[in-house]
Image: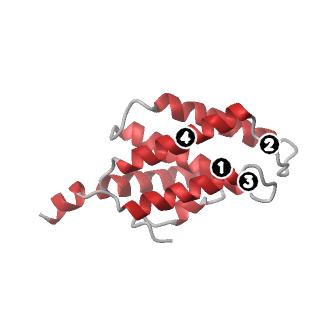
Amino acid sequence: MGIAVGRASRIPESTITSFQLILDRALAGLGDPALSEQSLHDLRFACVVSSQIELIGIVKGLGHVFKAASTAIEGLFDRCSITGDWLHQTPTPEEMTIFRELVEMNVFQLSQLSRAEFERVFQRSKNSFQMRSASTPAAARMNPSGKS
């Protein structure tokens, strides 16, 4: 019975709100040279989470959003790190539109997950992201229960 309840129960609204706040701060931080690198990592992690949700098949049909976001994130990351050191570059208006859509769709996806699905996706995303990046984003520092 406990397993069925865990699979059926939704993620607490506070967890979704926490992710929304982290991602809203990331969007705002892209314009700040001191915050832009971490902000881009946080958006990158959201993209990994969204892609994992799509891959597992929990919420499907949004892959084009995450592919566009991943391309925009990597393009901005390349521009900012072309010298080997972080050199802040302001995202284009088109990139900001793509990043805002990523955040909106990521939050929508999260709202559709059960606790068990969220924990599975979160762990897979964290493992995948850590293999790709030495920096751990704010969202990955949260545990699946939503507590930092």
Residue 58 x %, y %: 33, 41
Between disc 3 and disc 1, the foreground one is 1
Give the CA separation, mark 2 to mark 3.
Answer: 11 Å
Crowd band around label 2 with a 10 angstrom C-alpha radius: few (<14), some (14–19), many (20+): some
Mark 3 near mark 4, Cβ–Cβ under 8 Å? no
Give the CA separation, mark 3 to mark 4.
Answer: 17 Å
- Which residue lies under the disc numbered 2? 90
Residue 102 numbered mark, or none: 4
Q: For numbered disc 2, what is the local secondary structure?
A: loop
Specify the quadrant of the image occupied by residue 56.
Answer: top left
What residue type is disc 3 on?
A: Glu
Q: For numbered disc 3, what is the local secondary structure?
A: helix
Residue 53 x %, y %: 40, 43
Residue 37 numbered mark, or none: 3
Residue 41 x %, y %: 65, 52
Mark 2 near mark 4, Cβ–Cβ under 8 Å? no
Relative to 69, is 142 on the left or the right?
Answer: left
Crowd band around label 3 with a 10 angstrom C-alpha radius: few (<14), some (14–19), many (20+): many
Between disc 3 and disc 4, the foreground one is 4
- Which residue lies under the disc numbered 1? 27
Q: For numbered disc 4, what is the local secondary structure?
A: helix
Q: For numbered disc 1, what is the local secondary structure?
A: helix
Give the CA separation, mark 3 to mark 1.
Answer: 11 Å
Give the CA separation, mark 2 to mark 1.
Answer: 11 Å
Quarter of the image with the N terminus is: bottom left
Q: Residue at x 72, y 34 (%)?
A: 93
